[in-house]
Image: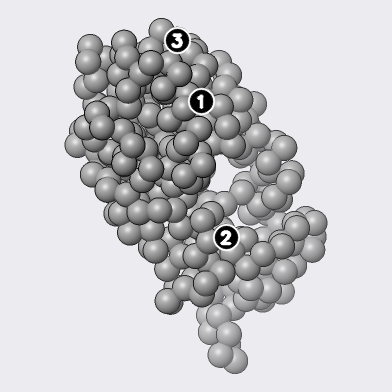
Amino acid sequence: MKMVSHHAGFIPGPVNVGVIRDEERIVLIDTGLDDQSAKRILKVVEEADCEIVGILNTHAHADHYGGNDRIRKLSKGLEFIYAPAIEDAIIRYPITEPVYLFGANPIAELKGKFLMGKPSPAEPLPSPSIPFGDLEIKVVSLPGHSINQVGYVCDNVFFCADTVFPSGIIEKYGLLYCFDVKAQLKTLRSLKNIPPYRMIVPSHARPRQNISLLIDENLSHMEEISEAILALLAVPKSAETLVAHLGEQKGIPLKSIWQYHLHLNTIKAYLAALLKDEVISVFVEKNTLVWVRK
Ligand SMILES: [Zn+2]
């Protein structure tokens, strides 16, 4: 457990798990992917002679809530599990993610642990500010990456969830998952005007005092993808054909059926934004849903 202020810290890992500490009582921000992640978190908390009394999830992607179940079962003092509205329902019914990615009863390939964590009870956040001992944990709305993602602020530390990814991850995957492009752009731009925090803790990047560079890198990635899609649509194409052409152009390594669905849905998020901006149109031709630049 690395404390970055008196009351706030994190447990580093593939997903940085936020820790808010009041004496020996701890509230976790997210719980990692699975039982293994939960085990690691429980060990760290035990070594610090602390007790987990609450879980605050940022959003309902499996790598952020998959550890809820085991932590809940092994933490006698647990008082609450909160998540933003809608995301709380997905955490209770994790089949929802494969369902929305596939659009029908999902095939087995979409039901692996990366898209479907173990179900866990979760209640919608009761207020924009969660009291915790003498502390206050403020909820910050950060939609775009997922339908209703939030971040949390406590003791001058901002846990900003999956709003920004480091350039290494952008290069590795070629296309950052996004649910709502317009909302994500708005969220990223709003983060450019945040007050100075003692520390900002993204889920998938090292904590830092200033995330301006990360925000700019994420914004330019999104602009680049948007422009590439628009250019490819000089010739009408289906969303599936766009996945193939964009992948070829950007050298995107699509290796699995579930990854393919994340990409296809992200491209649909870009198409929806471009359609709203009235720079493309959509129609059905020869039984194919076709998108084209205006
Ligand atoms: Zn996520």
Q: Nearer the viewer, residue 116 or 240?
A: 116
**Mark with earlier residue (2, 3):** 3
Q: Could you tell me residue 210's position as x and y percent?
A: 57, 19
How far apart marks 1 and 2 lie (CA) works out to: 27 Å
The kind of secondary structure element at disc 3 is loop
Q: Is residue 252 above or below residue 187?
A: below
How far apart marks 2 and 3 lie (CA) works out to: 36 Å
Q: Could you tell me residue 94's position as x and y percent?
A: 38, 58
- The answer to whether any part of residue 188 appears in the image is no
Q: Is residue 150 above or below residue 213?
A: below
Q: Disc 3 beta carbon < 8 A from ligand 1?
A: no
Q: Amino acid at mark 3?
A: Ser
Residue bearing mark 3: 5
Identify the residue at horizontal 50%, vertical 19% (top origin): 1
Q: Nearer the viewer, residue 18 or 237?
A: 18
* Mark 2 vs mark 3: in front: 3
Name the mark on residue 11. 1
Q: Disc 1 beta carbon < 8 A from ligand 1?
A: no
Q: Residues within 10 Å of mark 2 (few under 14, many from 20)?
A: some
Q: Could you tell me residue 50's position as x and y percent?
A: 36, 18
Q: Residues within 10 Å of mark 3 (few under 14, many from 20)?
A: some
Q: Is residue 250 left or right of residue 59?
A: right
The kind of secondary structure element at disc 1 is strand
**Mark with earlier residue (1, 2):** 1
Residue bearing mark 2: 262
Identify the residue at horizontal 46%, vertical 58% (top origin): 116
